[in-house]
Image: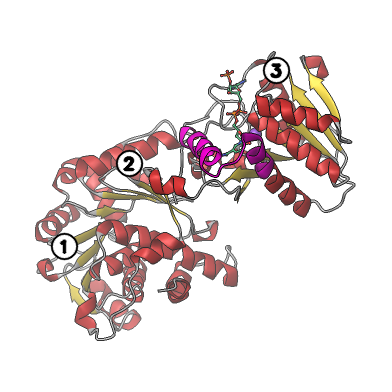
Amino acid sequence: MYIYSATDIRAWDEYTILHEPITSIDLMERASQACAEWLQQYQQQTTTGFVIFCGKGNNGGDGLAIARLLAESDHPVTVYILEFGHKGTEDFQTNLARLHGSKAVIKFIPAEENIPALTAGDIIIDALLGSGLNRPLEGLTAKVVKHINQSGLEVIAIDIPSGLMVDSSSIGNTVITAQHTLSFQCYKPAFLVAENESFVGHLHILDIGLHPNFPLEHPAANRWINQALVQSIIKPRNKFAHKGTYGHAAIIAGSQGMMGAATLSAKACLRSGAGKLTTHIPAVGYTIMQIAVPEAMTYTAGKEYIELAVDLGKYDAIGAGPGWAQHDTHKALLESIFQQTTKALILDADALNTMAQHQQLLERLPRHTIITPHPKEFERLFGKSANDFDRIQLALKKAAHFKIIIVLKGRYTLVATPDGLAYFNSTGNPGMATGGSGDVLTGIITGLAAQGYTPSEAAIAGVFLHGLAGDLAAAYTSQESLIASDLVEYLGDAFHQLVL
Ligand SMILES: NC(=O)C1=CN([C@@H]2O[C@H](COP(=O)(O)OP(=O)(O)OC[C@H]3O[C@@H](n4cnc5c(N)ncnc54)[C@H](OP(=O)(O)O)[C@@H]3O)[C@@H](O)[C@H]2O)[C@H](O)CC1
Ligand SMILES: [K+]
């Protein structure tokens, strides 16, 4: 599934109108019906009043149609139309004429003194501006939005909270703060960044039946990692398989006091289907690893810190960094890993911090190395970004420059590939913001890469399965109680959910 820009969404609209075919006003009616149905499901008491703020574009047109549909279902509805000094789009005008025949009360806001007082218990519908927004809100529009935000009432935004840019940062702008956003057909870039979380609230993507052929003909660089995509990647296991069929992985991890990171990575790697695993750890962790992960072979080098890794050329995938801590031997260790890597390499945690301190190492990264930074590690590596949109662009730029895959961890983890594609993960929950969660992800991706999945495939499927295991675990233990070991335990259930 693609994540389209505002321009692409407009094109999909027009494509549907032309090829379904359907008139523009009927498409608006379909979108509005989907919203009205959602709203009635959400608020079944017909005594609940809806106050609908409309602009004069098609977002406002949606608002007027929703007003008529709710009024027809006996909800008290008051509509406030913000005067922009023009007549409004054709579909806006058609819906205004249709609304005049309904029970809805229609009022206009030509000036500040007409901004209405809002009544406790009402639900506000925001249909002021949608995907046509092309500049920050100002003047009367900004005043209305601030008034709505200050009311403390529940706000439900249609398509996108008014004032929020679809494709770029809205930091510092006046934006509707919605508790729910009902958007159409597909995710938009604005919904995927942490900086917009407080505006969007709970997001609901409503199917309004835009033409299914459009995505086939218009691939986009921004993509959604969902079950269908991951199912197309993960292959069923071969009936005549033996442990050699599924690759030999190595996990280079751990230090005194941080052997948990190493064992979590190791377990996750095995639970993701790697045929064989050898762990490279410091001597201090030998007994811990042998007891915690009896399935793994163990090789030790260094006493409290892992110092040297030898004979790495034989591995199909190497995961390095979990639980290393900071130590001056790690630069040489990384150089040696880079030299010996023949296939896939996954770097996390202190391997990334070591690279951040010795930036020249970045230039020597083997092609298609996967790095899995969280935003702070990303910043240490590549510098600060003014906003989340810039950070995504920077990740794509660095992925292309170094020919690596960057897994930038967050609510919608980004997988940025060297060929300029940005995949956003759909699974996961805040319960996973807990120590060891990243070590499990490194293990999963290493385990998948060892089996022969390409680095991009391993990263995409890895983040999805990691998040899905987290969702399944949280459903059982709660988000609060979720610990990283649960992610390993629920990986099996996550694989079960893929119909292979
Ligand atoms: N496929 C779909 O998703 C469907 C979407 N629908 C709805 O249509 C809107 C998009 O409608 P559109 O008319 O293109 O845009 P808006 O309603 O958001 O904006 C209208 C005009 O407002 C002006 N504008 C832009 N920024 C500002 C601002 N800061 N302040 C005031 N005015 C602003 C701009 O015109 P200008 O000439 O002034 O530049 C806009 O053109 C979408 O969001 C959905 O709700 C369809 O109903 C169904 C299919
Ligand atoms: K809106």
Q: Circle 2: is it few (<14), some (14-19), or many (20+) Cα within 10 Å?
A: many
Q: What's the distance in space between the residues labelled 3 and 2, CA to CA?
A: 44 Å
Do the numbered discs 3 and 2 sit on residues whose CB atoms are within 8 Å?
no
Q: Secondary structure at mark 2?
A: helix
Q: State the mark number for residue 395.
A: 2
Name the residue at 77% across, 34% down. 52
Closest to the observer, 381 or 70: 70
Queried whether the magenta region covers residue 105, the answer comes back as no
Residue position marked by numbered label 1 in the rendering:
343
Q: Taking 379 as reference, is 252 left or right?
A: left
Q: Residue 17, relative to residue 288: is it above or below?
A: above
Query: Which residues, given as a range, are shown in magenta?
Result: 7-31
Q: Secondary structure at mark 1?
A: loop
Q: Secondary structure at mark 3?
A: loop
x then y, percent, for residue 20: 55, 45
> Which kind of residue does numbered mark 1 sit on?
Lys
x then y, percent, for residue 119: 86, 35
Residue 113 occupies which quadrant of the picture? top right
Q: Residue 109, relative to residue 282: is it above or below?
A: above
Q: Circle 3: is it few (<14), some (14-19), or many (20+) Cα within 10 Å?
A: few
> Which kind of residue does numbered mark 3 sit on?
Lys
Residue position marked by numbered label 3 in the rendering:
87
Q: Residue 16, relative to residue 55: is it above or below?
A: below
